[in-house]
Image (tube, rainbow, N blue to C red):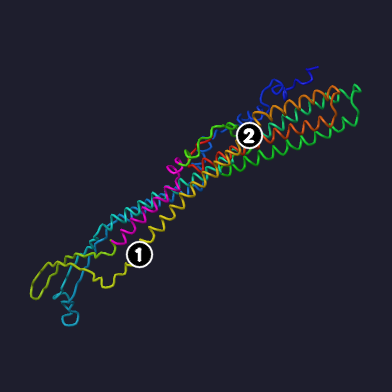
Amino acid sequence: MSLLFVCPATSTLLAGQAPVSAAAQAASQPSTAGPAFSWQQIQDRFQQSNPTLRAGAIGIDESRAQEITAHLRPNPTLTLFADQFTLFHSPLQPVANLYPDVTFNYLHERDHKRELRTDSAKAGTEISTSNQADLLRNLNYALRAAFVQVLQSKAIQALTKENLGYYDHVLQVSRDRFHAGDIAQVDLDRLELGRVQYEADFEAADVNLRTSKIQLLQLLNDRTPVDTFDVTGPFAFQDALQPLETYHQTALMVRPDLRAATQVVDKARIDHRLAIANGSTDPTFGVDAAHQPNPLNSYVGLSVTFPLRIFDRNQGEKQRTLLDIDLQQRQLDAATAQVFADVDSSYATVDSQLHLLRPYKDKYLNLAVSARDTISFSYQHGGASLLDFLQAENDYRGIQLGYLNLVGAYLTAAAQMNQAVGREVLQ
């Protein structure tokens, strides 16, 4: 009698194992179509090939190039002067009374203008680097969500395949019972029609899996055929949430957008000092040499030129940069508040998913297996009605699918938590 229930799709369930073990294992196992990539391998490929990240890296190089420009010294000027050409009075000797003069001038920048410009440019590079890290943080969330979606789709596809195999086994037993005269034709027909739903579930799961892979390949900027692309990784939840304050402190230390906001405040202070320095007077030192033919005489002269700053046109820039310090400080406060809000929100989401998953793992999954197997056994031996069997099958399928969706939601929430904190704190 018990041999009726031993089949590849149900033997693990009847042995008392977790009812979604086959689906969860399918999500973590590579397919035979090609090599499967782990999460770390996907991250490495993403950082190497994503066009948005590569464009951001070019932006950092541009900032470093601006450091070179900011560090340049003023170029000296050389003036060559010739006067007293005698073109009309002595056309045969036009240069007899030529008066040549050579002048060399150099602007000397005071109050460390060049150093402050360099510091401002370096601060800009640091901000660009932090912004690039923040871009990677946000894109990593999208990448992780797409990766989890592929794992979830693989698990659901394995689940629908397992359910279809189990239903086919029960359907074959029902055909044998019909031929033996144990059930009516109408009951067999209803069972045959019920297979349509399982077929539809499997086909929908297959389409969702292909779509999920396409979205992940798009983020990787990869043209690998979908049939030869696969990923592998654990599709399960970990009930190891730390206290909220721990994540707050970690986020304050590592969030790149918060670091960038702090660096913007520092740059604003440097720019204010530069604006004050630009208000100082820069002298121009000059050396000139000339030869005077009549009377014959040669000389060398020195000069120092000071601009008269009667109207200081830099006062507005000094005031603007001073106000900008306060503005950037307020934005830093807003960024800090956003960090706390992100961590609190993602923490609440993860905690909510864990509250939903715990009863599934401790109670509902086992109950669904027990109810389905009991009703199925009773139906095949005439102890339960067809309606009871179909309802038990539907409940079992719903519990399994609900659990897999909750695991996927948890892993997505964990990715959101990692994004909020600024590094991977949940797997």
State the residue in front, 126 or 73: 126
Query: Label 2 is placed on what type of residue?
Result: Leu
| Residue hosting label 2 | 357
Residue at image coords 48%, 47% = 339
Task: From this view, report whether residue 254 is shown above or below residue 304.
Answer: above
Q: What stretch is highlighted in magenta?
A: 249-276
Residue 381 figure quarter: top right
Q: Identify the element where label 2 is drawn.
A: helix
Q: In this view, does 173 lie above or below 400?
A: above
Q: Nearer the viewer, residue 79 or 95?
A: 79
Q: Looking at this rendering, what residue extends furthest in the bottom direction?
A: 89
Residue at screen point 69% across, 20% down? 15
Q: Check disc 1 and give the amino acid type.
A: Gln
**Residue 322 part of the magenta segment:** no
Q: Position of residue 47 (x, y in %)?
A: 49, 41
Q: Disc 1 designates what residue? A: 319
Identified at 23% across, 69% down, the residue is 307
Mark 1 secondary-structure assignment: helix
Question: Is 272 a magenta residue?
Answer: yes
**Whole-percent x, y for residue 315 in the image:** 32, 67
Position of residue 132 relative to residue 384, above or below, is below
Q: Dot 2, how many residues are within 10 Å of its Cα: few (below 14), some (14-19), or many (20+)?
A: many
